[in-house]
């Protein structure tokens, strides 16, 4: 068993920089950033720390082998070479999932079967048994084939890290918790910030901002797959949970106010805030965006209705226009709006200082950032006719 593991943390495109900062903060070593993922090193305690504390990544996986595999024999041999007996007990359950892209081995079910067979052969040989009952803890094996190179990984997370444990229900097309946490970071939410959201939905943006400001570890209210792994002792999990609790700052000056025209959304947001332990900091009320008046010191984080949350494009455009008018009348410290609407600037009536390409699940979006820019900083160039999702059709026109 190595003293240090190589770990992989996939994330949504656009979240990498924030995720790197988080990894640095918890003491990860040899951090490398790629498109939509980060690799890093650490001991068993890092598996616990990363799962408990990372806000902006989707899961944490233990990388076991990377090797060329253009035939089933090569695939089998690479898996068999891994010391599975050091990781999996004889009664372990070990389902295999994965994907293949631009590789000669195109059949995912066939690859699953070969990988499973290789693990079975190795475990039977090294555990000196002819029976593997798979009645014990589950160790989920994941593989990724890209251009005939295979990565074999062990999932340490279980359900994705966006499953914080506080959002039991959600409105249509909710924003992912991991993405909301990234937006709170890009919006420079601090311990004493005032944050508002005129389209709060189930409250995710404000709840994530509150937990960030109060340094509440996002994984405290849930369990992880590796808590049942024999090579990550229970004492390490207890130690890391205690450390995360001790680092919480519950006496900060942070406050958040969310508004939505739908009473059901407001009720849900209040319930979610209570489950997240931030109900004293997050306040949700029924209100129309036409009445929204941001406070001068406020940071506005929002996900304006669009697509599934809006029946018509015209309706979404009208809401963005109304928001722009209200923000012009009541300027604040900054507005950060994420939307799949590639015409948002035109509807809002003002070009953003910066934009960032992001994904909400599989939906391509842009984060439009408005703030009081330094004199030397230029506003973002106009969006191209073909936007991030290829649907932009008109040029930006100043209102």
Image (cartoon, helix red, strand yellow):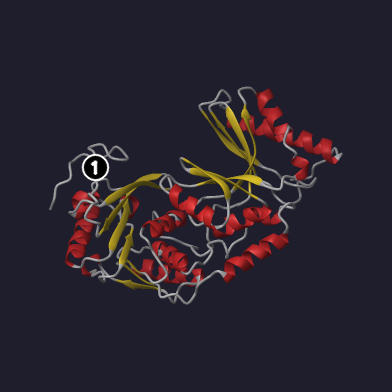
Q: Is residue 232 positioned above or below 280 on the image?
A: above
Determine the residue positioned at 67% across, 51% down.
43
How far from the left and from the top, in percent, is residue 51? 58, 56
Left or right: 248 with respect to 270?
A: right
How far from the left and from the top, in percent, is residue 45? 66, 56
| CA neighbours of label 1 inside 10 A, class few (<14), some (14 to 19), many (20+) | some
Q: Relative to the observer, which residue lies in front, 331 or 375?
A: 375
Q: Residue furthest right?
A: 128
Question: In the rendered image, which quarter is residue 293 located in?
Answer: bottom left
How far from the left and from the top, in percent, is residue 268? 42, 68
Q: Is residue 180 positioned above or below 132 on the image?
A: below
Left or right: 88 with respect to 317?
A: right
Q: Is residue 100 positioned above or below 371 on the image?
A: above
- Name the residue that disc number 1 marks: 383
Q: Give SS at disc 1.
A: loop
How far from the left and from the top, in percent, is residue 279? 45, 74
Determine the residue positioned at 39% across, 62% down.
205
Q: Quadrant of the image for the N terminus?
A: top right
Determine the residue positioned at 28% across, 50% down.
354
Q: Residue furthest front?
A: 376
Determine the residue positioned at 50% across, 26% down.
102
Left or right: 234 with respect to 373?
A: right
Q: How many labels does the image show?
A: 1
Left or right: 312 with respect to 280?
A: left
């Amino acid at each position: 068993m190595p003293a240090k593991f190589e770990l992989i943390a996939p994330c949504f495109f656009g979240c990498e920089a924030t995720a790197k900062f988080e990894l640095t903060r918890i003491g990860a070593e040899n951090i490398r950033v790629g498109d939509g993922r980060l690799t890093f090193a650490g001991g068993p305690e890092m598996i616990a720390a990363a799962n408990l504390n990372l806000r902006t990544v989707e899961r944490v996986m233990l990388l076991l082998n990377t090797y060329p595999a253009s035939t089933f024999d090569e695939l089998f041999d690479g898996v068999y070479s891994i010391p599975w007996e050091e990781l999996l007990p004889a009664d372990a359950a070990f389902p295999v999932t994965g994907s293949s892209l631009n590789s000669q081995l195109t059949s995912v079910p066939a690859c699953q079967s070969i990988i499973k067979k290789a693990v079975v052969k190795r475990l039977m040989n090294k555990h000196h048994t002819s029976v593997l009952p798979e009645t014990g803890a589950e160790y989920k094996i994941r593989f990724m084939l890209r251009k005939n190179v295979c990565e074999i990984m062990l999932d340490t997370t279980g359900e994705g890290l966006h499953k914080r444990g506080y959002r039991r229900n959600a409105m249509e097309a909710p924003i992912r918790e991991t993405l909301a946490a990234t937006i709170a970071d890009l919006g420079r939410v601090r311990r004493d910030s005032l944050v508002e959201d005129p389209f709060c939905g189930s409250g995710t943006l404000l709840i994530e901002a509150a937990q960030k400001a109060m340094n509440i570890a996002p994984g405290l209210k849930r369990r992880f797959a590796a808590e049942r792994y024999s090579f990550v002792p229970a004492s390490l999990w207890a130690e890391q949970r205690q450390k995360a609790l001790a680092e919480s700052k519950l006496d900060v000056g942070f406050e958040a106010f969310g508004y939505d025209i739908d009473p059901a959304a407001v009720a849900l947001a209040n319930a979610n805030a209570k489950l997240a332990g931030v109900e004293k900091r997050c306040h949700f009320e029924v209100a129309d965006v036409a009445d929204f008046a941001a406070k001068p010191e406020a940071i506005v984080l929002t996900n304006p209705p669009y697509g599934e949350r809006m029946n018509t494009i015209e309706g979404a455009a009208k809401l963005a226009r109304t928001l722009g008018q209200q923000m012009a009348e009541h300027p604040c410290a900054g507005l950060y709006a994420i939307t799949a609407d590639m015409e948002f600037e035109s509807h809002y009536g003002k070009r953003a200082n910066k934009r960032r390409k992001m994904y909400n699940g599989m939906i391509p979006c842009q984060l439009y950032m408005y703030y009081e820019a330094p004199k030397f900083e230029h506003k973002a160039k106009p969006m191209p006719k073909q936007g991030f999702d290829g649907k932009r059709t008109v040029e930006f026109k100043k209102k």
